Amino acid sequence: MTPNQTDRLATRFIQFLVLIVVLILLFLLGDIIISGLPHISWHFLTSPASSFSAGGGIRDQLFNSLYLLVLTLIISFPLALGSAIYLSEYAGDNWFTSLIRTAIEVLSSLPSVVVGLFGYLLFVIEFHLGFSILSGAIALTFFNLPLLIRSIEGSLHAVPNSQREAGIALGLSNWRTIRGILLPMALPGILTGIILSAGRIFGEAAALIYTAGQSAPILDYTNWNPTASSSFLNPMRPAETLAVHIWKVNTEGVTPDAVSISAGSSAVLIIIILLFNFGARAIGNRMYKKMTGGK
Amino acid sequence: MPAILQTKNVHLSYGSKEALHGIDLDFDDHSITALIGPSGCGKSTFLRCLNRMNDLIANTTITGNFQFHGQDLYAPTTNLVELRKQIGMVFQQPNPFPFSVYENVTYGLKLAGHHDRKFLDEQVERALKQAAVWDEVKDNLNKSAMAFSGGQQQRICIARLLAVQPDIILLDEPTSALDPISSAQIEETLITLKKDYCIIIVTHNLQQASRIADRTAFMLNGNLVEYDLTSKMFTQPAKQDTSDYLNGKFG
């Protein structure tokens, strides 16, 4: 075979592999959305789930997922931001930082069911938080931290060093340079990281079964007092999320329309995660353009 | 008139490797001094000692005497933030902040606590005019500084520096990333700035040094070989090495 032929063969082979990946993705997305979309209706999205009869919706589960997401981000974002700034801007290259990095790697590869059981034993039982959104949010923080830290660190790292020098040479302190110049420049990347990790949180089930619980008490959306047990804002109430709902309907659901509920819920889940992904890209591009004047 | 900045016996090492072997240089106010020499001779390293930018590099040891307005630059009590306001720096790659031109130029002033809109407007105009870029950006002050050409960006960076009214301007090969026309504009800008500032410029471009510098220092392998009036050095260099370098025999 001539080098030319080898090259063409290799190119074809690589294209073939990519095609397989794309086909798998398209097949999955297509199957879920096509079989789920017919079951999605306004009624499905806005009515509470029913345990025994057909016709229940996913209103509370959908809200729980979003609320849990917000709470998780409130807990994990400041932690991740601080750690990422430390790793990217302050830490030297020594055994201590490599220990931190290893810890982050390990954290990201923990099986979610293990984190769930750990959260159950520590937060739910030991700290008496019970099955609650708060327990769930803390457990999800475990997954979210490594993703967020890595993406924020990556975006800070991508800011050219000349910007740091510009800040320092202008008489800015290290912190002013970080706050005033590096963070704004890294913002598109940071936002993308947040939104992508949000997709991961949104789809997580195993860790939540043991922490946020599997029951969705009827919520009162007019009660804005977060300490009231029926209030939708109460972080101490058990909360079944959409992903957990799919799992539960399929394993122990007794409603006659369990199949269509899970198909519809799956489609809603996938669509929201797709929206997160496209949203992340759009926002990142827009902010980048705005800052660099479209260049 | 005493020199505004005096350095004596400057040694600098990265780890165990010494990069500067004892440099003595004095810089006068209202003049341009050029540092020339082949790549790796230590001219940029020396320049970065003057506003303590080398502090950022780990394992760097600097010894020697630096007197700025009669005060020791490296005294433990030196306020680095204040120091860098008085001794500003322009880099090889234009590095405007990713904000509007107006925000770039006012950044240092706002940091110093100036928020009066009228004062800021005046200072922006003054600095951009001094940097000879006002006519090109005055209608687009709210546009991102990064949207301008390389030469304009570099002059915006100079304006950003001038806004905080430094005493000394350090320039580290400010035109090497620019086209000849932009370079010529920067050179003109520097010549007009000379009457108000002490300017120290590192350059690879010998013609540039001969065009704009009052005095020139030639460095080689971490040593200062010769330091004299530019007109004298370029016509009658005292050392053979200088003559060889100026005639293109090496470097």
Image (cartoon, rainbow, N blue to C red):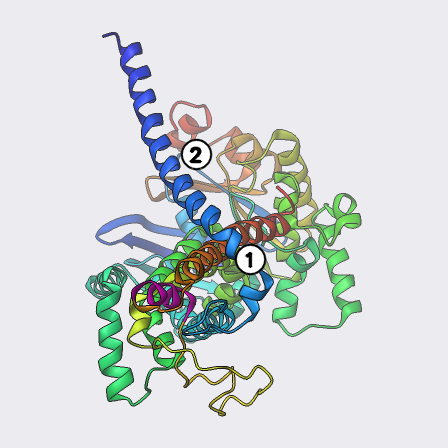
A201 or B120, nearer to the observer:
A201
A93 or B245, nearer to the observer:
A93
Tell me, for residue B247, which label it has, or none.
none
Pinpoint residue A250: horizontal percent, then vertical percent. 33, 62
Q: Is residue A76 highlighted in magenta?
A: no
SS majority, magenta: helix
| Residue at image location 46% in from the left, 28% down from the top | B246
Q: Is residue B75 visible?
A: no
| Residue at image location 62% in from the left, 35% down from the top | B183
A249 or A137, nearer to the observer:
A249
Which residue carries the number 1 mark? Answer: B88
B229 or A79, nearer to the observer:
A79
Q: Chain of mark 1?
A: B
Q: Is residue B212 visible?
A: yes
Q: Secondary structure at mark 2?
A: loop
Pinpoint residue B173: horizontal percent, then vertical percent. 51, 41
Pinpoint residue A85: horizontal percent, then vertical percent. 40, 65
Q: Are marks 2 and 1 in contact (CB under 8 Å)?
A: no
In the image, taking residue A230 as reference, residue B143 lies left or right, namely right
Q: Which residues are magenta?
A: A241-251
Q: Amino acid at mark 2?
A: Ala
Mark 2 or 1: the one toward you: 1
- Label 2 crowding class (10 Å Cα cut-off): few <14, some 14-19, many 20+? some
Pinpoint residue B58: horizontal percent, then vertical percent. 31, 58
Which residue carries the number 2 mark? Answer: B238
- Label 1 crowding class (10 Å Cα cut-off): few <14, some 14-19, many 20+? many
Q: Chain of mark 2?
A: B
